[in-house]
Image (spheres, helix red, strand yellow):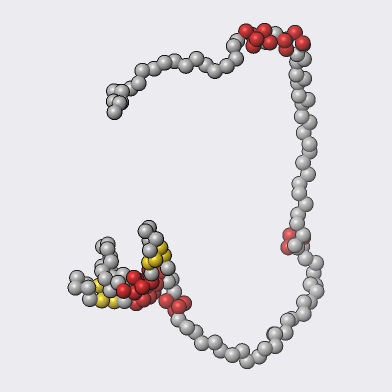
Amino acid sequence: MHRSVMGKPVDMAALRQKHKNVRAVGNMNVNAAGDTVDSNNEVISDSTSRVNQVYGRTTQNPRASQVRSVRPVADTKPAPQPTPTPPSQPIPPAFTNQPEPAPRVRPVAQPAPAPEPEVTEEELNEFDEFDAEEPVGKPPVIAQEPIGKPAKKK
């Protein structure tokens, strides 16, 4: 149950059921139920057959959607596993599951970074003079004329 803008209750399911045979707006030639209709609003094919037809074209294997019968398994015992026999010759290292050791890499000596020059107190205080002379605050506002005609007062 929905409410309209005016606050009245609207039963959408009843409206949908009442108008299911009315031609839908658009260029698909269907009614509100989704059935394909002709120019006289006669149902050509219903929506479920149309959906099944499209689905049948899109599946890769047409036999995949068929229902298959399940055969009962005759023997529920697992098949016996053959016992592994030890090899008569040793397995070469190339065929084992052991990872090969990583090649050794010699470390390369890096040059020491150059020391940074020391800054004296005089050099640090040198810029304080310039900062004190400049005013702190907002930049000045430049007056501009409005673009176009001014609005008329009523």
Placement of 150 over or under 28, stated as above or below: above
Quarter the N terminus occupies: bottom left
Expressed as whole percent of the image width and height from the top left, the position of residue 139 reads: 52, 16
Placement of 69 over or under 127, stated as above or below: below
Report the residue that reaches farthest toward the bottom: 74
Q: Is residue 44 left or right of residue 53?
A: left
Q: For residue 47, say whether it is visible.
A: no
In this orientation, which residue lies closer to the viewer: 121 or 140? Answer: 140
Report the residue that reaches farthest toward the front: 154
Total tally of numbered discs in the picture: 0
- Residue at point 29% right, 25% down? 152
Q: Is residue 119 left or right of residue 13?
A: right
Expressed as whole percent of the image width and height from the top left, the position of residue 2 reads: 41, 65
Among the 4 quarters of the image, the one containing residue 91:
bottom right
Expressed as whole percent of the image width and height from the top left, the position of residue 105 reads: 77, 41
In this orientation, which residue lies closer to the viewer: 105 or 35? Answer: 35
Q: Is residue 28 left or right of residue 62?
A: left
Placement of 129 over or under 15, stated as above or below: above
Q: For residue 132, say whether it is visible.
A: yes
Q: Is residue 21 left or right of residue 68?
A: left
Expressed as whole percent of the image width and height from the top left, the position of residue 148 reads: 30, 23
Among the 4 quarters of the image, the one containing residue 131:
top right
Quarter the C terminus occupies: top left
- Residue at point 38% right, 63% down? 8
- Residue at point 33% right, 22% down? 147
In this orientation, which residue lies closer to the viewer: 17 or 129? Answer: 17
- Residue at point 68% right, 10% down? 128
